[in-house]
Amino acid sequence: MSVRGPALTEHGPGLEERGPGPVPVTLSVNGTERHVYIEPRVSLLDALREHMALTGPKKGCDQGACGACTVWTDGRRVLACLTLAVACEGREVTTVEGLSEDGELHAMQKAFIAEDAFQCGYCTPGQIMSAVALLAEGHTSDDEIEERMSGNLCRCAAYPQIRAAVRAVRDGS
Ligand code: FES
Ligand code: FES
């Protein structure tokens, strides 16, 4: 007997009732269409890491507290651990793997290296995804950079270097 919950259409436009078992899900990730067969309860983070071998987004807390899983959907930052993969159909998902172009690192990635903005590197993909997005959003003052990077925790406490990297990209230096 199948057990069905409330229709997803009650929670968002264009989402149909599916599951609870594995269902086909199509996602556009870093410009490539990806097809996975997952339960609707699977997070975007697990879909990326476990089903697409995209391990740039990191699982730090898996409860929305650390920012290590930060990716973009349609250019907006989201915590992939709190986002259902099935809800990302029809959106463009970008992970840190999608930042480089033609094998060349993004300016923010280069700045993190130049400013020594990581130690273990576990938080770094999430830091970089937040950093690129906040500058694109026009949050460019030193205070805004500090405030809007505050959701990305770094257990190695590389915060001064991280902020220096963001400022370097802002200043084009
Ligand atoms: S793993 Fe998503 S916020 Fe920590
Ligand atoms: S560099 Fe280690 S957690 Fe940030």
Image (tube, rainbow, N blue to C red):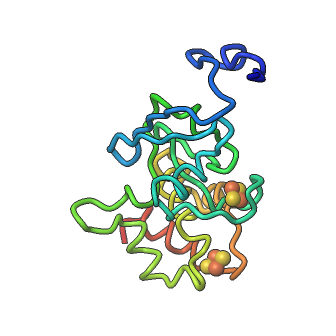
Image quadrant occupied by the N terminus: top right
Q: Tell me if 34 is positioned left or right of 55 in this view.
A: left
- The quarter of the rendered structure image containing the C terminus is bottom left
Looking at the rendering, the quadrant in which ligand 2 lies is bottom right
Q: Is residue 131 visible?
A: yes
Which of the 4 quarters of the picture holds residue 7? top right
Please indicate whether residue 119 sits to the left or right of residue 104 in the image.
right
| Residue lying at the far front of the rendered structure | 1
What x and y, as percent, mark residue 45?
60, 52
56 or 134: which is nearer to us?
56
Determine the residue located farthest toward the left in the rendered image: 102
Q: Quadrant of residue 110?
A: bottom left
Query: In the image, residue 88 lies at what x, y percent?
Result: 53, 34
Q: Nearer the viewer, residue 20 or 151?
A: 20
Image location (x, y in percent) of residue 60: 70, 66
The residue at 46%/48% (across/down) is 136
Q: Residue at x 71, y 19 (%)?
A: 11
Q: Is residue 51 above or below residue 127?
A: above
Q: Is residue 149 depicted above or below 30 in this figure? A: below
Res 160 seen here: no
Q: Position of residue 49 (x, y in %)?
A: 54, 58
Which residue is at the front of the view, 24 or 28? 24
Residue at 62% across, 49% down: 80
